[in-house]
Image (cartoon, helix red, strand yellow):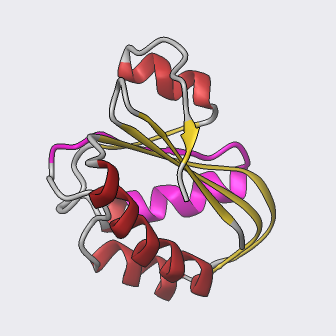
């Protein structure tokens, strides 16, 4: 499951774009890498986008494990948005939201990036890839 990271410095948004097959191992790998990236760029907002996912094989155990882990971007009040365009990913995201509500109170789930930007009251951000 490839993950691309990009950052909008003006608004402090770290964008994590997932593609390919979504599974438990990929989510665990994402969690570790996202912590490094969020700290590197001092992210104030995180957007996770799942629009390029080709298949989903994520278990409730995997979702629970990620929900119990410390958030990638420290700070309970930081906005976190999941872009979940399909019913399956939306449902899995809602399960995560319920399990993680204590550690991620700013988590929201939307269907498109446009909705995410509207929720944040931010016009189209300018993302630069980060390596």
Residue at the right extreme of this rendering: 54
How far across and down, in percent of the image, does residue 110 sit?
54, 36
Residue at image coords 34%, 68%:
35
Q: Which residues are magenta?
A: 77-97
Quarter of the figure that contains the N terminus: bottom right
Quarter of the figure that contains the C terminus: bottom right
Residue 88: within the magenta? Answer: yes
Q: In the picture shown, does residue 32 fall above or below 127?
A: below
How far across and down, in percent of the image, does residue 9 sit?
38, 32
How far across and down, in percent of the image, does residue 54 sit?
85, 63
Residue 93: within the magenta? Answer: yes
Residue at image coords 24%, 55%:
104
Residue at image coords 60%, 51%:
90
Q: In the picture shown, does residue 18 fall above or below 86?
A: below
Residue at the front extreme of this rendering: 131
Locate residue 131 relative to residue 63 in the image: left or right.
right
């Amino acid at each position: 499951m490839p993950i691309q990271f990009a950052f909008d410095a003006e608004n402090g948004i770290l964008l994590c774009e997932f593609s390919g097959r979504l599974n438990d191992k990929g989510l665990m790998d994402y969690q570790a890498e996202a912590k490094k990236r969020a700290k590197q760029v001092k992210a104030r907002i995180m957007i996770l986008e799942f629009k390029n996912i080709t298949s989903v094989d994520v278990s409730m155990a995997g979702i629970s494990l990620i929900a119990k882990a410390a958030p990638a971007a420290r700070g309970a009040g930081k906005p976190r948005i999941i872009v979940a365009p399909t019913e399956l990913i939306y449902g899995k995201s809602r399960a995560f939201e319920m399990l993680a509500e204590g550690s991620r109170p700013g988590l929201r789930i939307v269907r498109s990036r446009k909705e995410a930007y509207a929720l944040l009251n931010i016009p189209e951000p300018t993302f630069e890839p980060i390596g």
